[in-house]
Amino acid sequence: MNWSSIKTYGALTLVSLFYGINYSILKIVVPEYVGAYGFILFRVIVASAIFWIIHSFNTEKINWKEDGKTLVLCALTGVAINQLLFYKGISLTSAVNGSIIMTLTPVLVLIWASLLIGEKITSRKIIGIIIGLVGAIIILYQPDTLLTSGDWKGDILILINGASYACYLVLVKPLMKKYKPMTVVTWVFTIAIIFVVPVGFNQASNVEFSTLPSKVWWSMGYAIFIVTVVVYFLNAWTLIKVNSSVVGAFIYLQPIFATMTAILFFDEVFLIKHLFAAAFVFTGVWLVTMTKKSS
């Protein structure tokens, strides 16, 4: 392995680490100090401002007649629905549950690709989808004798959030081929403000900023600057070096980092069912994302 590969895979590992930690970090902020929807409003507005500062050095223009509708759909699925449901869901369920459910994203991308652009689903991929969904069901099923800090309602929201983000990945791909990534993401976040303001305004306006402890400020800063801005740049850079399937495969590391963080610092409990669920999910995603040579 050469130095370039080491740097690329190192960056992808950092992305998974940052995302994995984020599941627990968010539980410091939401919902005790800031409502989930209110926090999303702050996140989208601040992130948009940062992206516009960076984008100001780029004079690229959008062809609104051809791509305006797609950008609006990307803002709706990739930021508004995706983030609103994720933050609300993670406030209800455990970091462990949320991180494992999100590993279904590559499977959900396959389903959307088939529905939206007619991509063929092979029998191997169908088996992978079924196995992955079994893993999600294992997480969602919680009999009284096997309760965790997770809540099935939060799990469902995380699952829908993953489906929304997967749809976004399919919709945004043609735009990434036509424009620079920074141009696309800047407009996606900007348009998303229109969707999140009506939902998050009341919660955001009720936040008493003067009373927020330092841990909440640090947590919000981490979610906005690290998970939004830094992670975006790392992902954009790695996509130049490797194909998207390699980038997507590194999502498998998120449950590991999320579980380690939750157990070490937030006193969450890891159950045997999580191990079985992860095994099903990873197997399903692996079958779906196998290269054609392996078919």
Image (cartoon, grey):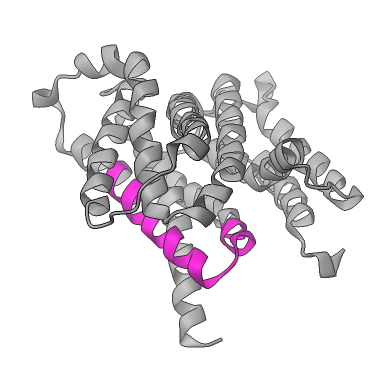
Q: Quadrant of the C terminus?
A: bottom right
> Which residue is painted at 26% across and 30% down in the image?
42
Residue 242 position (above or below residue 82): below
Question: Given the current orientation, which residue lies at the most extreme bottom position?
Answer: 2
- Please identify the quadrant where the N terminus is shown: bottom right
- Residue at 15% over, 32% down: 213
Secondary structure character of the magenta stretch overall: helix
Q: Is residue 228 magenta?
A: yes
Q: Where residue 214 sits in the image (x, y, percent)?
A: 15, 38
Q: Give the residue at the far right of this rendering.
A: 123
Depicted 95 relative to depicted 230: above or below: above
Say which of 4 and 102 sits in front.
Answer: 4
Residue lying at 46% horizontally and 46% vertically, measured from the top left: 263
When the figure is inspected, residue 195 is found, relative to residue 280, above or below; the finding is above
Asked whether, in this view, residue 219 is left or right of residue 74, the answer is left
Residue 31 visible in this rendered orientation of the protein: no
Magenta-tinted stretch: 224-250
| Percent position of residue 52, x then y | 25, 45
The answer to which image quadrant residue 270 occupies is top right
Query: 152 left or right of 32?
Result: right
Q: Nearer the viewer, residue 237 or 32?
A: 237
Residue 123 in the magenta stretch? The answer is: no
Using the rendered view, name the quadrant where residue 155 is placed. top right
